[in-house]
Amino acid sequence: MKLSLYQRLSLALSLVFIAIASVFYFWSEQVSEELRYQSQQRLHLSLAANLARDNPLLQTGVYDQYALENLFHTLMVLGPAFEFYFVDPSGKILTYSADQSLIKRQQVSLVPILSLIKNQAPLPIYGDDPRHINRKKIFSAAPVFNGDQLQGYLYVIVAGEQYDTIFNTSQLNRQFKMYMVLTITAIAFLFILMLGLFRYVTNPVRQLQRDMQTFIETNFNKEKVNLNRWKNHSNNEIQQVGCMFVQLVEQINLQIKQLTNTDDERKELLAHISHDLRTPLASMQGYIETLHLNSASLTASQKTEFMQTVLRNCKHLNLLIDQIFELAHLEGGQVSVDQEAFNLVELIYDVVAKFSLEAENQSVMLSILPWTTNVQVYCDIGKLDRVLTNLIENALRHTSAGGEIKLELVDLDKHQCQLSVTDNGTGIKKEEIAYIFEPRYRASNAVNNSHKHNGLGLAITKRLLQLLNVEIKVESNLGKGSRFSFAIRKA
């Protein structure tokens, strides 16, 4: 049987209460008994001295065992609560008022007797009980002299065994009834108090548990869960946990949506990539089969043309595969960033030099503004090289003959500089700018573009700049060109 938090708290507090009540009960009993014995001993402190002084047998100091036994018997009949003993100066019991079969020891210690007679210790003082091996009792004692010679001590147990038996029986019954009544009343009151208190304390826990259970049963769909309103600035820990749970729900739903969107994008990307892979492969297969089947009937120029076509498709296929792996590597989050200080202008000239021949063949001018400068930046040189390469490739693809591509470097402040790649090519529609960094997205300006490309260059560029904590901005007008710019931290 599983107990709830409310039930466990109630049970634990009940057990603690019973334990405390029991300790208090036994402690109060001990204190009460101590006070009772102190009062009785103080009340009968001079009993033995009065008996020794007033009784002729003891007053003369003459020891007569038979006479003393009769005397003690008579006194015990008159006072059943007392037990009378006569001991010699060494503590040996000489005679007594009890039945001989009841006596368990033949000698008592004189230390407590002398302490009581000389008033050397606070009351109650306990002496040996002749009717028990180890038990102690309160007593009254007085020395008995014969002239100046000590004959022994009159030793009187104040609360004897008969008294204890009767008293304990009645006291136990009375205390047991009182203890049971008090205990039942206290426990009933405690349970009523606990029911209200624990319900108040554990009610938020139950609400939180219901929210969690409902959230799990609805397959972590926040839209199907009516969450409780938790107090944001409360000092109550449960309220704080509730607020944290709501934040977790929001985060989980956001991540689920992101994963769903990412999965949809991956499926779409996979479909596009499969199509792009099939296209050059089909073309290559067709030309190779033609060469294989009709090799004897083809002229040398035709064979050369077919092989060049196959080679172009191989290069295109190899580029596509490289970009797919690069994009997957970037999105995997396992890419390290190695930042260092370097001259940005030197990097720009190196990248432009890679495209100078291609730009010349397309009759496109590549220019750097300003021509001479020295700007030290702190960045990952390899990733920045890749970003500039992708941006220039994209600009060449959309710039017709006679056009111009400019790489411009401008100081923003003493901490940052801005690098931009501007072309006067086909441009992009304003409503399409937000989508151009998505993998496989082809803007309307690229539909009729004669240059083959895979649509992954700008997506890779965006991922690289995100790794560098750099935001890229795009400005474009259809038919007038585009401008890609981003800021870099100076060294």
Image (cartoon, helix red, strand yellow):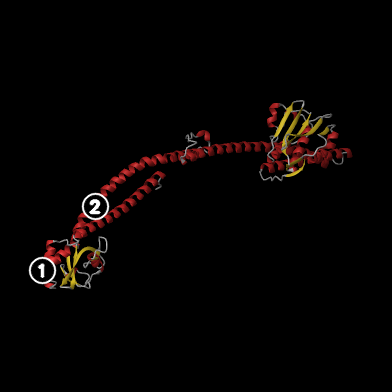
Q: Position of residue 27 (x, y in %)?
A: 30, 55
Callout 1 secondary element: helix
Q: Position of residue 101 (x, y in %)?
A: 18, 70
Q: Position of residue 263 (x, y in %)?
A: 63, 38
Please give the name of the residue rendered at 29% of the width and 48% of the height, measured from the top-left corner: 183
Q: Which mark is residue 175?
A: 2
Q: Marks 2 and 1: in contact by CB < 8 Å?
A: no
Callout 2 secondary element: helix
Indicate the amino acid at tag 2: Gln
Indicate the amino acid at tag 1: Pro
Q: Which residue is mark 1?
A: 56
Q: Is residue 278 left or right of residue 4?
A: right
Q: Residues within 10 Å of mark 2 (few under 14, many from 20)?
A: some
Q: Position of residue 480 (x, y in %)?
A: 77, 26
User: Can you tell which of label 1 and label 2 is closer to the viewer?
Assistant: 1
Instruction: Please tell me whether residue 289 is drawn above or below residue 117 in the rendered image.
Output: above
Mark 1 to mark 2 CA distance (whole Å):
44 Å
